[in-house]
Image: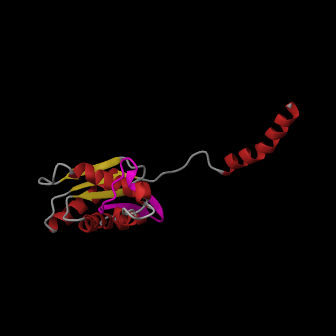
């Protein structure tokens, strides 16, 4: 019995040891600087205002924690939390919520994703990607539909795109 336990331990050691040695002990996570996140939110808010929309804008980091939350003066009371959840969903799934809303409809194979706590599959959440890496997400709530919210979020991201790419 003792020989079997020793043999099993010796056989498992290269697998466990190899897996641990191949992976770094620490991982780097890049996020937008607070001023950059604020600039994204302000630009998104300005884009929505120019179209006549009163919205809330949320910018989250790569882990989904809120960096910035702005609510325009006449945006509904539900819009800050809705914007935050859209941004969080975009980061969590690494996809825009407009596409997720379509891909997770009632009669799709992915409909169950809508049951995950905190997820909001409504257009208006967009991940912020730099050189293929997720650095944050933007969520907008309060426009007339998800497409308009999505467009405002993208305008906010594009306002700092060059700065993000130069920082990479």
Q: Nearer the viewer, residue 96 or 62?
A: 96
**Could you tell me if residue 8 is visible in this image?**
yes
| In the foreground, 50 or 85 | 85
Residue 129 rendering spot, x and y as whole percentages: 42, 63
Residue shown at the point (32%, 48%) measured from the top left: 67
Q: Position of residue 47 (x, y in %)?
A: 21, 66
Image position of 27 (left or right of 112): right
Question: Which residue is rendered at x = 35% and y = 62% of the image?
Answer: 97
Residue found farthest to the top: 2
Q: Is residue 37 above or below residue 96?
A: above
103 versus 79 height, above or below: below
Residue at left offset 24%, top offset 62%: 44
Q: How is the image coloured?
A: secondary structure
Residue 4 in the image: above or below residue 93 = above
Q: Is 129 within the magenta? A: yes
- Quadrant of res 153: bottom left
Q: Position of residue 101 (x, y in %)?
A: 35, 63
Residue closest to the eye, 162 or 61: 61
What residue is rendered at 42% in x and 55% in y?
A: 112
Q: Which residues are magenta?
A: 114-134
Residue 141 appears in which quarter of the rendering?
bottom left
């Amino acid at each position: 019995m003792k020989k079997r336990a020793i043999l099993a331990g010796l056989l498992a050691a290269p697998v466990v040891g190899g897996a641990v040695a191949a992976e770094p002990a620490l991982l780097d996570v890049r996020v937008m600087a607070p001023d950059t996140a604020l600039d994204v939110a302000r630009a998104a808010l300005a884009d929505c205002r120019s179209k006549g929309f009163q919205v809330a804008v949320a910018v989250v980091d790569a882990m989904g924690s809120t960096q910035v939350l702005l609510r325009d003066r006449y945006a509904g009371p539900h819009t800050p939390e809705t914007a935050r959840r859209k941004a969080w969903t975009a980061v969590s799934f690494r996809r825009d919520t407009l596409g997720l809303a379509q891909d997770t409809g009632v009669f799709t194979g992915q409909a169950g994703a809508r049951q995950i706590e905190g997820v909001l599959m409504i257009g208006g959440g967009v991940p912020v990607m730099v050189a293929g890496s997720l650095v944050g997400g933007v969520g907008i709530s309060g426009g007339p539909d998800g497409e308009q919210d999505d467009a405002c979020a993208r305008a906010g991201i594009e306002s700092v795109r060059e700065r993000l790419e130069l920082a990479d």
